[in-house]
Amino acid sequence: MARLPRIDVPNVPQHVVQRGNNRQAMFFHDGDFPVYLGYLREALIKHDCSLDAYVLMTHHAYVLTLGKVTGAISRCRTARSGLSRPVQSAVGVL
């Protein structure tokens, strides 16, 4: 069964979870966390979203974000889907 589309309403906070591929680790060193947060900040600014809260764990990230216009969170989420790649490639994992 296909996943239902995300309800995307402006100015309503949404809880978004990002996991590594096949639930593998996303972060390998303490320095990976600030790198990820920098990329996350760029995506939030670019797509007009605000960050209300976040939790970063080795295997996944929880983000509570608010989109200011319809579709902002989806665009931001799509941009963030590739954020773990630079972190992983920096330590040699593909």
Image (spheres, rainbow, N blue to C red):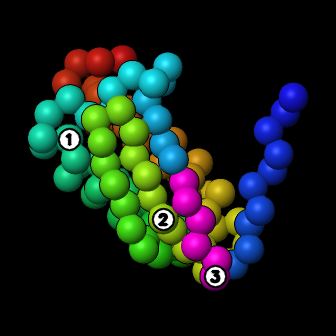
- The image's mark for residue 22 is none
Residue tagged 1:
32
SS at mark 3 in the image: loop
Residue tagged 2:
64
Residue that appears at 51% across and 68% down: 65
Which stretch appears magenta?
A: 11-16
Label 1 to label 2: alpha-carbon separation: 20 Å
- The image's mark for residue 11 is 3
Q: Amino acid at mark 3?
A: Asn
Badge 2 density bin: few <14, some 14–19, many ≥20, Cα 10 Å:
some
On the image, the x and y values in percent for residue 92 come to: 23, 18
Is the residue 12 above or below the residue 28 in the image? below
Taking the image as shown, residue 37 lies to the left or right of residue 18, namely left
**Disc with the residue nearer the chain's start (1 vs 2):** 1
Q: Mark 1 vs mark 2: give the one in front.
A: 2
On the image, the x and y values in percent for residue 76 come to: 55, 58
Taking the image as shown, residue 38 lies to the left or right of residue 22, namely left
SS at mark 1 in the image: helix
Q: Nearer the viewer, residue 54 or 83?
A: 54
Q: Amino acid at mark 1?
A: Asp
Q: Mark 1 vs mark 3: give the one in front.
A: 3
